[in-house]
Image (cartoon, rainbow, N blue to C red):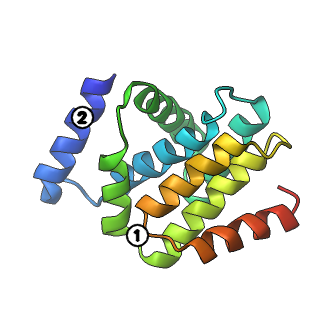
Amino acid sequence: MLASIQRFFQQALAEPEAQRDDTPTLELAAAALLCEVMRADYRVDPAQLAALRELLMTHLHLEAEAVASLMTMARDEVESSVDHYQFVSLIKQHYDYGRRVELVKMMWVLALADGEHHHLEEHRIRQLADLLHVSHADFIRAKLSVQEQGG
C-alpha cells in the first residue's frame, strides 16, 4: 500500500501536466494529517471515524465512495509513515494561510468528536499547526471555536 501511495506522489509531482489538477494529492495529504490526529491517543472512536467521513465529504467536497477509499489509503499511510513531511510540505505549498487554519480547525473537530479532550491529540494538533506555520493564536482560536460549537 505504501509503495502505491509513493508511486502516486512521485507521478503527481514528476508529471503535473499529466494530471488534471493536484486535488487528489492534496486530499490525501489532508486526510493523512487528519488521521494522524485521530490516532494520537492510540484509539480510534467510531464517532471520530464518522466525523472524519463528514469532514472529508463536506470540506473536501468528495463523494461517499471516494471518501471510503481515501480514508483507507490515508489510514494505511499514517500507520506506516515515519513522518509526515511530504503531506505537510504539499499542504504548505498549495494551501493559503486561511485554508491551513481551516485544516487545523478540522483537526480540532476530529479530536473532540469522541467527547473527550485528550492531551495527546492536542499535542499532535499543536505539532502539525507548527509545521503548517499556523500561529499559536490561530491554533487557540480554532480550538475555542470548535469547543463553543460543541465539538
Q: Residues within 10 Å of mark 1 (few under 14, many from 20)?
A: some
Which mark, residue 6? 2
User: Spatial distance from mark 1 to mark 2, Cα to Cα?
Assistant: 21 Å
User: Which residue occupies 83% across, 62% down?
Assistant: 147
Q: Against 64, is 13 above or below?
A: below
Q: Position of residue 59 (x, y in %)?
A: 60, 60
Direction from residue 3 to residue 77 in the image, left or right: right
Kind of element beneath mark 2 = helix
The image quarter in which residue 108 lies? bottom right
Q: Against 70, is 56 above or below?
A: below
Give the residue type that dot 1 points to: Tyr
Q: Position of residue 109 (x, y in %)?
A: 72, 54
Q: Nearer the viewer, residue 10 or 84?
A: 84
Direction from residue 135 to residue 87 in the image, left or right: left
Please report whichever mark, 1 or 2, sits nearer to the chain's N-terminal start. Answer: 2
Kind of element beneath mark 1 = loop
Q: Nearer the viewer, residue 61 or 124?
A: 124
Task: Look at the image and tell me whether residue 58 can be seen.
Answer: no
Q: Residues within 10 Å of mark 2 (few under 14, many from 20)?
A: few
The residue that mark 1 highlights is 95
Q: Residue furthest top?
A: 1
Task: Look at the image and tell me whether residue 124 can be seen.
Answer: yes
Q: Against 135, is 106 above or below?
A: above
User: Which residue occupies 42% across, 76% down?
Assistant: 96
Q: Nearer the viewer, residue 63 or 90?
A: 90
User: Which residue occupies 30% across, 33% down?
Assistant: 5
Q: Position of residue 53 (x, y in %)?
A: 65, 42
Q: For the residues labelled 1 and 2, say whether their Cβ atoms are less than 8 Å apart.
A: no
